[in-house]
């Protein structure tokens, strides 16, 4: 006999079936192709008839002159996004938390959250127009003040900065909502006690608000470690060009070119496998740190 509690939870488990099916088909079934990383894979021969190469593909990747440059670009862009992606939403949430007019607060929240719903295909086209050296709004302002037009998306000194700033602009609204949810969990009596003691708004923020959301800050910071090798393929693919490969080329774009453009499937799979293994280790470490410092656990 099915217990009453389990009977009530059956609909919830059934709701998981479509999502689990999609994950199984698109995430786990393709893992059977990992063996291509250890082969000289030829599509005409297929997976079972292609010659095995052992670790040759990995050795070849290490010897490529661009591998470590691409790895460095991936790490530096991802780390910059992680740091600013934590600081900016936190600061904005703290500032909006001090606003007393609910209508203004809701309006600002809606405005900063809207870019999160736009794909990088759309935003990429918008940014190309805005940053255009001839007709872009930004360069129009620069020239109006006597400066020279800047090729933001074709200049290695600017490209990485543009990538990080635009990503933060797109996603900080979502992070702000997470911190707002944490702020609502702070006991209001703590603010009342601080006000009775004569604390200013700054003192309340520093001694009540921030300590109250420290667990969430630690949790988000540790969980973000799993994204060290995810610098944002969609964004960079829609904005970069061969001119800025020096500072903008990342592992995902390198895999795309080697695998889909150059049809070197074994090499692309080897790079992807390397990235997956490192990401798995980092995610495992991040969850351990989240449990250690924020008492967060999945099960």
Image: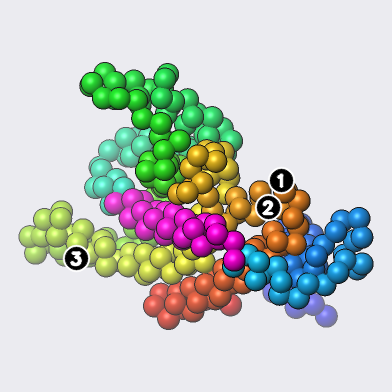
Task: Give how far across and how far down residue 164 sits, in percent.
Answer: 41, 47
Query: Can residue 72 be seen here?
Result: yes
Is 166 located above or below residue 214 in the figure?
Answer: above
> Could you tell me how far apart the alpha carbons at marks 1 and 2 are, in whole angstroms?
6 Å
Query: Can residue 93 be seen here?
Result: no
Q: Which residues are magenta?
A: 63-91
Q: Quadrant of the N terminus?
A: bottom right
Between tags 2 and 3, which lies in front? 2
**Residue under label 2:** 258
Does residue 140 belong to the magenta stretch? no
Task: Give how far across and how far down residue 239 sits, in percent.
Answer: 52, 38
**Residue under label 1:** 261
Residue nearer the viewer, 241 or 97: 241
> Could you tell me how far apart the alpha carbons at marks 2 and 3 are, in whole angstroms?
52 Å
**Residue under label 3:** 207
Q: Earlier in the sequence, mark 3 or mark 1?
A: 3
Name the residue furthest left. 198
Graded by Cα atoms within 10 Å as few (under 14), some (14 to 19) or many (20 or more), the crowding at tag 1 reads few
> Could you tell me how far apart the alpha carbons at marks 3 and 1 are, in whole angstroms?
55 Å
For residue 292, what is the image quadrant?
Answer: bottom left
Image point 91% across, 68% down: which residue? 48
Image point 36% across, 30% down: which residue? 150
């Amino acid at each position: 006999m099915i217990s009453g509690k389990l009977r009530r939870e059956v609909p919830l488990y059934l709701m998981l079936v479509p999502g689990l099916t999609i994950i199984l088909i698109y995430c786990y079934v393709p893992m059977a192709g990992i063996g291509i990383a250890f082969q000289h894979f030829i599509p005409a021969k297929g997976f079972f008839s292609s010659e095995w190469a052992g670790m040759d593909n990995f050795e070849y990747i290490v010897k490529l002159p661009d591998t470590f440059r691409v790895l460095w670009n991936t790490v530096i862009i991802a780390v910059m996004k992680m740091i600013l992606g934590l600081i900016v939403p936190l600061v904005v949430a703290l500032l909006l938390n001090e606003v007393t007019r609910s209508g203004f607060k809701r309006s600002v929240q809606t405005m900063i959250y809207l870019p999160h719903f736009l794909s990088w295909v759309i935003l990429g086209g918008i940014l190309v127009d805005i940053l255009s050296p001839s007709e872009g709004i930004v360069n129009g302002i620069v020239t109006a003040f006597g400066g020279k037009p800047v090729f933001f998306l074709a200049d290695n000194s600017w490209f990485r900065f543009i990538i990080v700033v635009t990503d933060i602009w797109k996603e900080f609204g979502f992070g702000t909502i997470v911190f707002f949810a944490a702020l609502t969990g702070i006991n209001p009596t703590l603010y009342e006690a601080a006000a009775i003691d004569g604390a200013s708004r700054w003192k309340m923020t520093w001694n009540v608000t921030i300590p109250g959301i420290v667990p969430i800050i630690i949790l988000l910071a540790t969980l973000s470690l799993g994204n060290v090798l995810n610098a944002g393929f969609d964004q960079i693919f829609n904005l970069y060009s061969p001119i800025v490969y020096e500072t903008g080329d990342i592992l995902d774009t390198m895999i795309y070119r080697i695998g889909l453009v150059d049809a070197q499937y074994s090499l692309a799979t080897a790079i992807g496998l390397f990235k997956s293994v490192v990401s798995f280790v980092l995610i495992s470490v991040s969850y351990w740190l989240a449990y250690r410092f924020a008492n967060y656990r999945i099960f």
